[in-house]
Amino acid sequence: MNTTVIDSFPRPDLSARRVVIIGGTGRVGEGIVSAWLRDGAEVVVPTRAESRGAELREYLADVDSQRLHLAIGEYTSFATAQAMAESITSQYGPVTDVIASIGGWWQGKPLWEVTEDEWQHFNQDLSTAHVANIRAWLPILPSTGSYHLILGGSASKPVPGSSIISMEQAGLLMMHRVLTAEAGDQRRVFAHELGPVATRQRPFIDPDWVSNQELGLVSETLAANPGMASEHFLLRGKHHVRQVLEQATAGTTRS
C-alpha cells in the first residue's frame, strides 16, 4: 500500500480520545480503526457478529489492540442505536468522537427496474441507520469532539445503474449540510466524500487512490484540532488528502 502521504505528515496524539467507529469491521472501516489505535486512541467498534470482530482483531495483529473494544449488538434502528450508545458510554465512559462508515455499494439496474426490497434496504434502511446514530451520539459528544460521515463519490456524481445508492448518499450529503447549519459551533460534523478506496481486499489499486489508513489519518487529525469547524471534504485522490492534512495539522502534533 502506498503510504507516502501518511509518512509525510506528523501523527496526532489521541491518548485522551475515545472513538466509536461504526462500520469498523468493514473494508474501509478497518483501516480507520488501525490508524486511531496506532496513535493512542481508545476505540470501540459496534458489530452485529462476533465473527467479524474476530476477523478485525486478526487484521490488527501487528497493532497494540488492548485499547480496542467490540460492542456486540444491533445499532441500525432508532431504538437499537440509542441502546448501543447507552451501553458503550456506561461500560467505557464518555465518547469524544464517532465515525459512521455505514453501508456499501450497489449497482446493477436502472431506477425504473429496482424492486421494493432493494429500495427499502439500500435507501431507506441505510439512511435510517445513519439518522439513528446521529440521534444517539451527536447530543452527547463534547463541543471539542467530532462526528464523521464517510460517503461515496455517488453523493454528488451520478453513476448509471447505482440510482438507489446515489440517492441515499446525496441525501446524507444534504443531512451533513443541515446538521452543520443546526449545530453551529456546538458540534463539529465532517463529511468525507471518497472515490475508490485502496483496501487490502482489492486485486488492483491505483497509486492515486486514497487508502483506508489515509482516511483514518484525515479523520483523526481533524478530530484532534478543535479549531477545525464542520466541513465537507472531497477525498478522491492523494492530493486531496495532502490538502486536508495541511489545513488541519496546525497545533495537533506530538514530538
Image: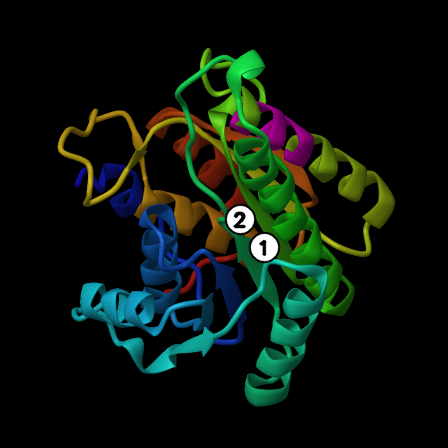
The quadrant of the picture occupied by the N terminus is top left
What residue is shown with label 1?
225
For residue 14, say whether it is visible.
no
Prevailing secondary structure of the magenta residues: helix
Viewer-nearest of discs 1 and 2: 1
Q: Look at 24% across and 66% down and name the residue there.
A: 55
Q: Are marks 1 and 2 in contact (CB under 8 Å)?
A: yes
Q: Nearer the viewer, residue 80 or 245?
A: 80
In the image, the segment drawn in magenta is 165-172
Q: Which mark is residue 250?
A: 2
In the rendered image of this protein, does residue 56 appear above or below residue 153?
A: below
Bin the neighbour count of mark 1 within 10 Å (Cα to Cα): few under 14, some 14-19, many 20 and up: some
Q: Which mark is residue 48?
A: none
> Which amino acid does the dot numbered 1 rest on?
Asn
Q: Is residue 73 left or right of residue 132?
A: left
Q: Number of labelled discs? A: 2
Q: Look at 45% across and 58% down and name the residue there.
A: 253
C-alpha span from label 1 to label 2: 8 Å
Residue 84: percent from the left, percent from the top? 61, 73
Q: Is residue 199 left or right of residue 157?
A: left
In the rendered image of this protein, does residue 220 appear above or below residue 254?
A: above
Bin the neighbour count of mark 2 within 10 Å (Cα to Cα): few under 14, some 14-19, many 20 and up: few
Q: Is residue 153 left or right of residue 7?
A: right
Residue 183: percent from the left, percent from the top? 82, 49
Q: Look at 38% across and 68% down and name the residue there.
A: 49
Whichever of callouts 1 and 2 sits on the residue coming sooner in the sequence is 1
For residue 200, say whether it is visible.
yes
